[in-house]
Image (cartoon, rainbow, N blue to C red):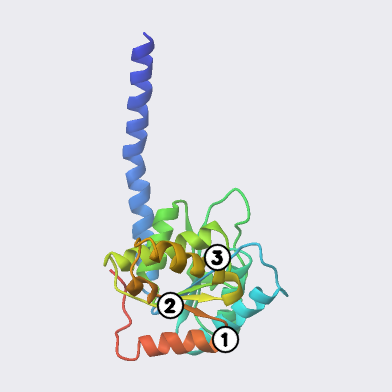
Amino acid sequence: MRKEQHTKGWNEIKTNDSWAIFKIMGEFVYGFEKMSAIGPCVSIFGSARVREGQPYYDLAVKVAQRVAEAGYGIITGGGPGIMEAGNKGAHSAGGTSVGLNIDLPFEQHDNPYIDDDKSLDFDYFFVRKVMFVKYSQGFVVMPGGFGTLDEFFEALTLIQTHKIHTFPIILVGSEFWKGLMDWIKDTMLAAGNVSPRDLDLIKLVDTEDEVVEILDSFYKERDLSPNF
């Protein structure tokens, strides 16, 4: 009897998993249709816990302003902190301001600087990450936590393995990122787990002008298009 009960429960799980496919498909269709109409954008990542008036918040606003003035839209995760700063900078420059929101039990809520018709809501992190990668012409990575690192290393892995086209990945804040970059060079590279060429995928800067210079230089002779 006990074995039959376990089997019944397992079959119910498998049935639920099968139906979840349709919800996942729906999120992909929704995201693709909305994002494909927006045009060239740059994603800005960083901590949700940074507040207005703190140095990296203010720098993220400046970065987003300059990037928007250079003709790119801004995509963020739609929440507070650095995400809010990114949308605020885009909004103040009159640029496209996109928010890819995720349903979380804490920290996440829409910020007021997202364009009304460009606020998208997702239940699945992996669907949301596809939208960031597919429709971004560059990643600007401000200081952040685990989620920021997740996006950063996901993009590096996809480019390294040639699953997507190369695009600029820009770390902003050398004081914050120096320890990570030193570890990658002194430990990962020294162990042979990455190649020197892989390190060329990452740019480390401190100012908004440097961010725009890298983006403009990269796309001077390249098309702006979705990444896969």
Q: Which residue is mark 2?
A: 41
Q: CA distance from mark 2 to mark 1?
A: 14 Å
Q: Which residue is mark 3?
A: 78
Please state, as top left, top right, bottom left or bottom right, where the N terminus lies in the image: top left
Where, by quadrant of the figure, is residue 112 drawn? bottom right
Tell me whether the residue at label 1 lies in contact with that at label 3, contact meaning CB atoms closer than 8 angstroms.
no
Q: Which residue is mark 1?
A: 93
Q: Is residue 219 above or below residue 22?
A: below
Using the image as rendered, state which of residue 206 and residue 123 is in the foreground.
Answer: 206
Please state, as top left, top right, bottom left or bottom right, where the C terminus lies in the image: bottom left
Residue 100: x %, y % from top left: 49, 64
Is residue 173 at least partly visible in the picture? no
Residue 81: x %, y % from top left: 63, 67
Query: Total number of numbered labels?
Result: 3
- Badge 3 amino acid: Gly
Residue 56: x %, y % from top left: 64, 74
Q: CA distance from mark 1 to mark 3?
A: 18 Å
Circle 1: element type: loop
Circle 2: element type: strand
- Badge 1 amino acid: Ala
